[in-house]
Image: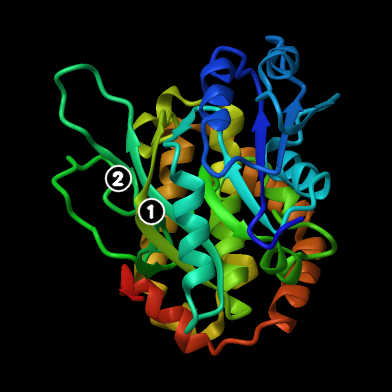
Amino acid sequence: MRETDYAVCTVTHDDAADLPEFLAAVGRLEPGPAEVMVVDCASADGSAEAARRHLPAGRRGRVVALSENLGFAGGANRAVAETSAPFVLSLNADTRPSPGFAGDLIRALTDEGRYRVGAATGRLLRFVEPGEPDRLDACGMRLTRTWRHLDRESGRVDQGQLQKTERVFGATGAASLFRREALEDVAVEGEVFLEEFHSFREDAELAFRLRERGWEVLFVPEARARHRRFNLPARRSAMPAAVNLHSLKNRYLLRAYHQTPRNLARFLLPTLWRDLAAVGYVLLRERESLAAYGWLWRNRSTILRRRRLIQARRTVPTSDIDRWFTHQARPR
């Protein structure tokens, strides 16, 4: 394979309606992918069959149908393992990348000489009704003092803001390019995405490991794609109970693996306030998510063991990571 070849890796679960248009968009990418890998997580709507029917012609394409739903993390790990291209383009079935999306991201990574870049993400826009203004969906990931990870400019009207390539904290798993070397470097016990996260916050957790090992992440504004996002904080009450449970569980897992004593002392008050608010919300309005606390307690030994593995491989000072809690981006 060439050094700039890439594999499209997609995880599906009941996405049959999206797959024809999505795979048609993949077929229009220039340069085209060397590999297209679709891993279906036990869909009940015929997603695997739809993917096989619509795989782009002339490309090495495969569909793997799993018998159980391993979530985005488990499905993505299988997709990465089944491909070999030097770059991995992670795309959700509800995205529509522009024809130049992959090429723009690859050029940004391969042209960067100053930094050790492991990932790049583009300018994601939401689907809107005719006549409505374009709204941004994600322009890279940022952190807050309460240990939230948010997509920059999410939901805001696109007025041409953020037009420079910048270093950002992380990249959304919905539509981002990863250097395979970086993914292999940060893997934990063979897992690129930690499978205990299942299907929420796994991309933020990966961003921490990339940064802790000295890999940079770029936001590339000319790389554009559409994304039909459903899982938003404002829609929490309409989201499946299983998704809400993973969301709650994973906010604590993220900190268990990556929060340092220094960071805990610095951001104790805002994170404690948010923790108390979360407990109150679950007790009053979302009691089905209480099982997340039980899961964390039962798996505490495994969590502590994984934390030790992750922290032992850090090569970047704590202070460098902490800066991302107060800065949205840094110059290229």
Work out whether residue 25 can be spotted: yes
Query: Under tag 2, what secondary structure?
Result: loop
Identify which amino acid the numbered label 2 is placed on.
Ser
Query: Under tag 1, what secondary structure?
Result: strand
Q: Position of residue 217 (x, y in %)?
A: 48, 67
Work out whether residue 170 can be spotted: no
Task: Report crowding for label 1: few under 14, some 14 to 19, many 20 or more residues within 10 A (C-alpha).
Answer: some
Q: Position of residue 102 (x, y in %)?
A: 51, 47
Q: What residue would you read off at disc 1? A: 150
Q: Which mark is residue 154?
A: 2
Residue at image point 68% right, 23% down: 57
Q: How many marks?
A: 2
The C terminus - image quarter: bottom left
Vertical position of residue 90 compared to residue 164: above or below? above
Residue at image point 70% right, 44% down: 34
Q: Quadrant of residue 228?
A: top left
Give the foreground label among 2 and 1. 2
In the image, 30: left or right of 195? left
Q: Nearer the viewer, residue 55 or 174?
A: 55
Identify which amino acid the numbered label 1 is placed on.
Leu
Q: Which mark is residue 227?
A: none
| CB atoms of marks 2 and 1 within 8 Å | yes
In the image, 225: left or right of 43? left
The N terminus - image quarter: bottom right
